[in-house]
Image: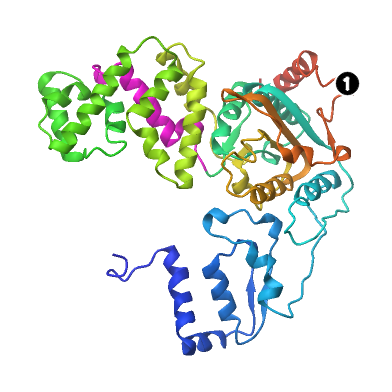
């Protein structure tokens, strides 16, 4: 279709010129002779098409200047191949390598920790970052019982630092998976910490979460006209052949029969395929209300399975589908804490009206991938746990290690790593990356605490923080 319309998407803009250079020597010679040198930045992120293009465009001059850091190659899921930067000298015999090892961003303890973690990647290009900024503060490594406790502690500590002069925009919370933002968001709302979710929407605004809540709402009151919007949202997820025309017919039947849209399905003439699929959907929704008393989490899990919503996501191997599955797992885990559907719906409504948004004076919440290239004076790194970071389904543990390196080196002055004993219905253990940080570069408490007082993080300290925030009008 693109070719018929003489159009190209982004991938085509890489593919077609590269193929032209590969197959037409005259064309390749004409273009490569136009340049005396080729310069490429972020070379650790090139894919095969970009590599071939660069190699052929520099063929005539023999001059290719590439800048990159193989320790920050974290985009294999986009097609990037770290082997291109690591094999540069083999691809271009006689190439010279210049190691730029002085770091102007971070303090000594942060760099020593980062160097130690990345040193366990045996294939990396050897280098050791150093700084002239001094040792600075050691990395805080903290364990908590639950994710909610971890999030509340981070919110309190951010509030304490703000009360002592830290700017909100100099603080970031960086996590491996976007579903992990949920507990942080809610703790920030409660503590009145202004925040912005970078490159994403809040947990309760995410597509799969809103779909799951719609299923719950529909199952709670299938015959109520107030559930019609929920029906419109999920009746065709996964696809059941319900188009605008069929939905219009159901709307007419609902008006005629004086019932909800779900209740109108049996009274609507639909195509055999669509009619059968929608009938099964209606039966599933109604059956959920007849089941034995169960937790909201159990009902939600059953609905997602029986309606085909989760199976459809499992059949999709894209990263977006994986993110949606992670968000649903977080929602199901949270839903177990509610006795009634109305309670979780009310909770979602309150959290959706959070004071998050965009603006300069806000704490930044973002994933490790989005944090690349950025820097903050204070960086919090929650959920460093086996099974999450690195993940159980991680395709490449060496790339996860590079992500740890990227995350740590976002911090300019203070870095805080935390983990939980229990998250999302399962026991957890600290990430292997924590153990790889030398003992002399980390401290198992907040830096401001007196020795042996880590167990007393609440009480007087929290009361003092509240007094400081009240003085600033933030509590």
Q: Which secondary structure lies at badge 1?
A: loop
Query: x, y (%) of residue 439?
Result: 86, 37
Residue 23 magenta-drawn?
no
* Above or below 43: residue 120: above
Which residue matches tag 1?
Answer: 452
Q: Quadrant of the N terminus?
A: bottom left
Query: x, y (%) of residue 218?
Result: 31, 22
What segment is highlighted magenta in the picture?
Answer: 200-227
In-image side of 366 versus 283 (left or right): right
Front residue of this view, candidates 449 and 147: 147
Query: x, y (%) of residue 311?
Result: 38, 36
Query: Residue at coordinates 40% horizontally, 64% vertically from top-left?
Result: 9
In-image side of 252 versus 88 (left or right): left
Query: x, y (%) of residue 100?
Result: 79, 64
Residue 346 appears in the figure: no
Residue 255 appears in the figure: yes
Q: Quadrant of the C terminus?
A: top right
Q: Which SS does the magenta portion mostly show?
A: helix
* Above or below 234: residue 256: above
Circle 1 crowding by C-alpha within 10 Å: few under 14, some 14–19, many from 20: few
Query: Residue at coordinates 70% horizontally, 48% vertically from top-left?
Result: 375
Query: Residue at coordinates 64% horizontally, 64% vertically from top-left?
Result: 83
* Above or below 51: residue 381: above
Residue 34: name its quadrant: bottom right
Residue 76: name its quadrant: bottom right
């Amino acid at each position: 279709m693109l070719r018929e319309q003489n159009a190209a998407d982004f991938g085509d803009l890489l593919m077609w010129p590269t193929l032209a250079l590969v197959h037409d020597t005259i064309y390749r010679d004409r273009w490569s002779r136009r340049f005396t040198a080729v310069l490429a930045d972020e070379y650790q992120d090139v894919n095969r098409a970009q590599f071939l293009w660069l190699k052929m465009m520099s063929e005539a001059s023999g001059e290719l200047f590439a800048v990159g850091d193989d320790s920050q190659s974290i985009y294999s899921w986009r097609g990037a191949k770290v082997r291109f930067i690591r094999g540069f000298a083999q691809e271009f015999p006689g190439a010279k390598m210049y190691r730029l090892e002085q770091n102007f961003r971070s303090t000594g303890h942060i760099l020593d920790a980062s160097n130690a973690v990345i040193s366990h990647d045996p294939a990396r290009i050897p280098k050791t970052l150093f700084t002239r900024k001094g040792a600075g503060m050691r990395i805080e490594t903290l364990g908590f019982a639950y994710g909610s406790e971890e999030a509340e502690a981070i919110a309190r500590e951010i509030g304490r630092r703000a009360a002592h002069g830290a700017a909100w925009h100099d603080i970031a919370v960086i996590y491996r998976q976007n579903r992990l933002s949920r507990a942080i968001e809610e703790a920030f709302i409660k503590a009145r910490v202004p925040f912005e979710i970078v490159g994403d929407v809040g947990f309760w605004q995410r597509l799969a979460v809103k779909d799951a809540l719609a299923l719950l709402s529909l199952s709670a009151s299938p015959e109520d006209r107030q559930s019609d919007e929920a029906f419109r949202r999920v009746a065709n997820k996964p696809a059941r052949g319900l188009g605008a025309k069929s939905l219009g017919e159901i709307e007419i039947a609902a008006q005629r029969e004086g019932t909800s849209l779900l209740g109108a399905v049996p009274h609507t003439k639909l195509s055999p395929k669509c009619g059968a699929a929608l009938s099964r959907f209606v039966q599933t929704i109604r059956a959920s209300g007849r089941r034995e008393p169960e937790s909201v989490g159990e009902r939600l899990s059953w609905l997602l399975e029986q309606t085909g919503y989760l199976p459809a996501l499992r059949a999709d191997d894209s990263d977006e589908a994986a993110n949606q599955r992670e968000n649903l797992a977080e929602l199901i885990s949270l839903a177990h804490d509610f006795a009634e559907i109305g309670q979780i719906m009310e909770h979602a409504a309150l959290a959706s009206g959070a004071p998050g948004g965009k603006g300069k004076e806000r704490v930044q919440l973002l994933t490790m991938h989005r944090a690349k290239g950025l820097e903050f004076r204070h960086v919090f790194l929650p959920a460093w746990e086996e099974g999450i970071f690195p993940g159980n389904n991680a395709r490449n543990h060496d790339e996860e290690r590079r992500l740890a390196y990227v995350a740590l080196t976002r911090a300019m002055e203070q870095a805080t790593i935390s983990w939980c004993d229990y998250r999302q219905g399962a026991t957890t253990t600290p990430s292997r990356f924590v153990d790889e940080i030398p003992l002399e570069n980390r401290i198992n408490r907040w830096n401001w605490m007196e020795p042996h007082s880590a167990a007393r993080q609440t009480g007087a300290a929290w009361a003092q923080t509240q007094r400081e925030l009240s003085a600033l009008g933030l509590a």
